[in-house]
Every structure is written in structure tokens, then in C-alpha cells.
Image (cartoon, rainbow, N blue to C red):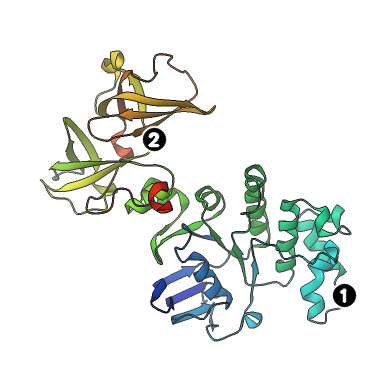
Amino acid sequence: MTDTTRGDVRLSGISKKYGSFQAVHPLDLTIPEGSFFALLGASGCGKTTTLRMIAGLEDPTTGTVRLGDQDVTALPPYKRPVNTVFQSYALFPHLDITENIAFGLRRRGIKSVKKQVDDMLELVQLGDHARKKPHQLSGGQQQRVAVARALINHPKVLLLDEPLGALDLKLRRQMQLELKRIQTEVGITFVHVTHDQEEAMTMADQVAVMNAGRVEQLGSPAELYENPQTTFVANFLGTSNLITAEVADSSGDSLVVKAGDAKLSLPAARTSAETRTGGKVLLGIRPEKISLVHADEAGTIAAGRNRITGRIAQSSFIGVSTQYVIDTPVCDAFEVYVQNIERDGRLTPGTEVVLHWNPEHSFGLDAAQDIDAGTEEEVTA
């Protein structure tokens, strides 16, 4: 029988404690061979500690690290088939790009390195810069050199610890696509640590959202964004409007919930909370899923849509969309993003409006959770 876990990274009961501080609570995690996997979370959530335990740079307090069939928990870093790229690329300033990339091979006593180095230079599209020194390259080019230097050793797993953190926004976005291209081309497992939600969503096949040393939710970027299971994931990955509501009817495929004077529909299949008539639930809706019309146009809204009334408190035009903050009876500071197609000039601060959306786009969460978990304000605090 074929062993389908041959190249998977498997963490079993892995944890890390520093004195009385539990940096990583025991977790089980399987990172599929050949995938681009992201550990995403705010500073101090345990993501880098988890990466360092895979690399062998930290000894786990409990649990095991396996690469395929091999238990590497007790192996030192240099005996593990992994390489790490850090935020500081640690290139040798006195060596040119060719020799920086060849360093690992030379250290192992391999003398004929030209073809392998040339292949790596082609992979990272730096063939024209082979004889330059690191200080003659841009930040993005230096980052590609660091990736090439790691990949030339043919690791089973490449670990990336906030590798784009030192780059400006435009270059960071270019490098996100570049790293994804390289990973697809070489086909090895990439494990990427980041606090940047967009970075994780752009590059990763699978994302583990970490919070306070635990994995809150694991899934594809689309799954995490469209159907978050906790308030932390809902707020940390993008923006969510969360409405505290009472369940009026839980008997059908869609729940009927009440928030103030509004009756709203919520798909039972997209609700992770236990629901019973009379109980509380958080109804979530993403800002870009909502349509906004002037109160005078309320009669044009199709039947069956969820709808609430409000007054525009703020509006910000940002080019691709206008972002509105709406005061509503059911939720303060309700956010709505309206794509810049046909702008209604009447939608200015102080205007009475109606917000409406397809009920199928709503998701339901346990109302016992902290409604602000994962927001920028909560994470910063």
C-alpha cells in the first residue's frame, strides 16, 4: 500500500512552555506534502514558536515532530531536511550572489556547483545579477537570493518566518505572487509564518489561524473568510459586522432571528453555535456583501432579502470602493463597502438608508464569545 503521508509534516501533541508561560498549547497539525501552508496570527500567538519547533531551533515541551515517516523531534536543526528563510535574510555581504547561493553546497564539500546555482538563479529570475553583491540588490531581490540559497539544499520543507516583513507594500505584494510561483514550480512544502492576513490569503492553500497558543481554525482561505467558526477568526480575517440577535424560530433550514425591530434570516448550515428558540446568536455579515440604498428607494429592494435601517455616520472614498460607517438600531458602526460602479451622490453623512443582503451570505456564531475578539483594537491591547 502506498504511504500517502510520506512527505507530510505532522505535529502531534506539540507544545512549548517557558517557565509558567504557555507559548503553545498542545496541538495536532498535519501539513500536507507539497502544500503552501500558512501559520497566521498576531504577535505573541505562538506561530513563530511552532515554526521554530519544526526547524529544531526550539525543543518542544511535549509532543513529536515528524517529517513523513521520520521522527525528527530529537534531531538538531542541521540534521533535519528543512531550511529556514528569516525576515533578516542574513546574506554574506562580502560574497556575490552566486557564492551566497552556493554556500550550503560548498559547506558540504560539493565542488561542482555551477549547474545547480544556475538553475536556482533561473528559478528566482536573477541570472543577470549573479556577480553582484547583496547591497547592490533591492530588498525583494535579496529575499529571492535567500530563498534560492535555502532551496539549493533540496529540503523537504522550506520554513519562512515573516520573510516579507521588511518590504514596502507594493514590493510585498509582488513577492507574494513570486513566492507562490516558486513554490508551485519546485513543488516542495512551504510553511509560512505571518501576521499579515492578505499575505496568508494570497499565497497559502491552507491557513491555520492561531490565537493565544492555539489553532482557532484551519482551512482554505475562502473557507475561513466565508464561514468563520469563531469571533476571533471573523474579525481577524478582514472585517465582520456582528449582530447580537435572539432566535425566534430554529425549526427550519434557516433560522429566524430578531435584532431590535428587524427580523433576519440565517442559514442553519452556516451557524456554528447551538441554536434554540429564545437563545442568543451572533449573526455575521461581511461589509462587501451588503447593498446600500437611500431610504426613498426602500420599495425597490427584492423580497426575501435581510434588511435593516440606519443613518450614514461616515463615508470614505478609496477608489475601488466607498466605505461607509452606518449607525443602526442593531449594531453600532456597521461597515458597508460599496463597489465604485454607479455612485449615488445622495449617500452622504446624515442620510437615512436601508442596508440589505442575501441571507445566504450571513453566518452564525456563539453569542457567548467576545464580540470584539480579533479586532485591531483588541489585538493591539
Query: In the image, is residue 15 above or below residue 90?
Result: below
Q: Quadrant of residue 56?
A: bottom right
List x then y, in percent, for residue 114.
87, 68
Helix, strand, or loop for circle 1? loop
Q: In this view, does 377 lie to the left or right of 153?
A: left
Query: In the image, is residue 235 above or below residue 73?
Result: above
List x then y, in percent, for residue 25.
39, 72
Helix, strand, or loop for circle 2? helix
Indicate which disc residue 27 carries: none
Depth check, front residue: 144 or 272: 144
* Residue 88 in view: yes
* CA distance for labels 1 and 2: 57 Å
Query: In the image, is residue 245 above or below residue 156?
Result: above
Q: Which residue is disc 1 drawn over?
A: 112
Q: How many other residues sit within 10 Å of disc 1, few (<14), some (14-19) or many (≥20)?
A: few
List x then y, in percent, for residue 104.
76, 74
Q: Which residue type carries mark 2?
A: Pro
Q: Which residue is disc 2 drawn over?
A: 287
List x then y, in percent, for residue 364.
27, 46
Q: Which residue type carries mark 1?
A: Ser
Residue at 80% x, 62% y is 119
